[in-house]
Image (cartoon, grey):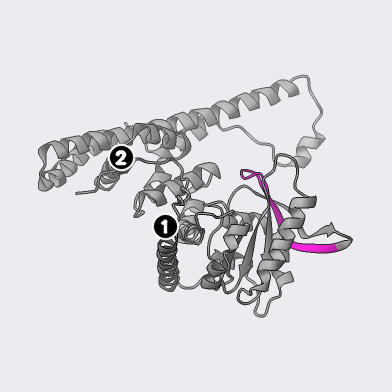
């Protein structure tokens, strides 16, 4: 009988479950025995193999479901009748469910068919199967674009997100907010694509009314893990109110991070209210000083992001902030109701696309090639045929 992913995981946990001590105090009071080192080594072997077995089982399940979906797709396309597709999927599901259980119910079989249709490249599927479970894939399949699916797949794989964290990321429209930030960057931007979002959702701090910038800084440091989950992977905090000295004077950056993948410092300034023109000069000065006194050999030039409660995106574009390595984003400390949240994001996205179109017209005769956005795996345009 075919086992579902959860059943398989539970079965392996029972087989390889080790008995744990009641508490740390008991362990410390135990007398060392000659076999202690042996037991430690054996536990490491078992735990390592346990993880390896789980990955192999998981990969096998994902690849099996993809192959089933691919074969059914081939049969449906061969007949070229839409009604036949519905009929064969129902018939196949009934027979497979009789043989192998509810994993092959009609809803799940339709997911397998869509999985094989949307992810037609076996190399991509093989990579996904080694990093994500079928439960992860089920959650990214309903997304509207392949770019969004690949973004969430990459985030889940890179940061080892569980199902709950992945759903949290999707519900908060992380991809869409990152795309809004990307749309603000010009072809001559010194700010890398795919690093920042706009807006940021900082509702996890539960700040009271009339909070101060210092309150937000403190909340970020206390709940750093939550902030970095929202901000994006790769960031490591160097310091809050980081003191930098230049020409005999002290300057203080609200938050200073190092981004491991970009190999560069990232300065973050937190502002209450709308973006103001003078913020550009302040951040630009910080970046110049950081580049002079803090940048290490082998690192790229520092970049900065100014977080405001009002972004004034048109003014930010006019000032060409990104060309000097500065991004500007809004932050929201309260998450609006779902429909209002989605409407507001759609409104911001449309405005960003309009500004992009105006920018394209202005750059039309400059022969400047736009930067390419890097996703989880770059698909070819004909890899993903449209659904019937």
- Please identify the quarter of the rendering in which residue 89 is found: top left
Q: How many numbered marks does the figure carry?
A: 2
- Which circle's residue, 2 or 1, is located before the other in the chain? 1
3D distance between C-alphas at marks 2 and 1: 32 Å
Q: Would you say residue 256 sits in the magenta stretch?
A: yes
Q: Residue furthest front?
A: 365
Q: Quadrant of residue 240?
A: bottom right
**Is 312 rendered above or below residue 60?**
below
Residue nearest the viewer, comparing 126 with 251: 251
Horizontal relation, residue 4 to residue 205: left or right? left
Residue assigned mark 1: 365
Measuring 69% from the left and 67% from the top, which residue is drawn there?
281
In this image, 203 relative to 215: left or right?
left
Residue pictured at 78% horizontal, 19% vertical: 34
Q: Which residues are magenta?
A: 250-265
Residue 222 visible from this viewpoint? no
**Quarter in which the N terminus is drawn:** top left
Mark number displayed over residue 383: 2
Q: Nearer the viewer, residue 40 or 20?
A: 40
Query: Where is residue 65 shown, x and y percent of the image?
Result: 32, 36
Q: Residue at x 43, y 74 (%)?
A: 340
Helix or strand or loop: what does disc 1 sit on?
loop
| Tag 2–tag 1 contact (CB < 8 Å) | no
- Please check the rendered image and state whether residue 214 is part of the magenta-colored stretch, yes or no: no
Q: Position of residue 13 (x, y in %)?
A: 51, 34
Measured as percent of width and height from the top left, residue 328 is found at 59, 65
């Amino acid at each position: 009988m075919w086992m579902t992913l959860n059943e398989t995981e539970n079965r392996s946990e029972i087989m390889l479950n080790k008995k744990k001590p009641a508490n740390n105090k008991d362990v410390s009071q135990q007398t060392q025995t000659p076999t202690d080192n042996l037991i430690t080594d054996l536990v490491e072997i078992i735990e390592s193999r346990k993880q390896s077995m789980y990955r192999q089982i998981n990969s096998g399940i994902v690849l099996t479901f993809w192959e089933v979906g691919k074969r059914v797709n081939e049969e449906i396309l061969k007949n070229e009748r839409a009604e036949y597709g519905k009929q064969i999927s129902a018939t196949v599901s009934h027979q497979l469910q009789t043989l192998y259980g509810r994993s092959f119910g009609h809803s799940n079989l339709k997911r397998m068919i869509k999985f094989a249709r949307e992810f037609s490249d076996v190399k991509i599927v093989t990579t996904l199967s080694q990093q994500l479970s079928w439960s992860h894939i089920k959650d990214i399949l309903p997304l509207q674009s392949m770019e969004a699916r690949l973004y969430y797949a990459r985030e889940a794989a890179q940061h080892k997100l569980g199902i709950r964290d992945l759903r949290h990321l999707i519900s908060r429209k992380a991809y869409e907010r990152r795309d809004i930030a990307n749309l603000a960057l010009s072809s001559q931007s010194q700010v890398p694509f795919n690093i920042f979002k706009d807006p940021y959702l900082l509702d996890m701090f539960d700040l009271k009314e009339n909070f101060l910038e210092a309150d937000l800084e403190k909340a970020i440091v206390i709940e750093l893990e939550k902030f970095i989950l929202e901000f994006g992977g790769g960031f490591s905090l160097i310091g809050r109110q980081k003191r930098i000295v230049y020409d005999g004077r002290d300057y203080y950056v609200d938050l200073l991070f190092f981004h491991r993948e970009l190999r560069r410092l990232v300065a973050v300034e937190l502002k209450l209210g709308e973006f103001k023109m003078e913020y550009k000069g302040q951040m630009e000065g910080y970046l110049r000083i950081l580049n002079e006194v803090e940048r290490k050999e082998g690192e790229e030039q520092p970049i900065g992001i100014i977080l405001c409660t009002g972004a004034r995106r048109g003014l930010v574009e006019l000032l060409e902030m990104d060309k000097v390595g500065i991004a500007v984003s809004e932050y929201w400390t309260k998450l609006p109701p779902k429909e209002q949240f989605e409407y507001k994001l759609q409104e911001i996205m449309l405005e960003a696309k309009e500004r992009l179109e105006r920018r394209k017209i202005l750059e039309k005769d400059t022969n400047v090639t736009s930067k390419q956005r890097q996703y989880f795996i770059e698909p070819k345009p004909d890899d993903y045929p449209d659904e019937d």
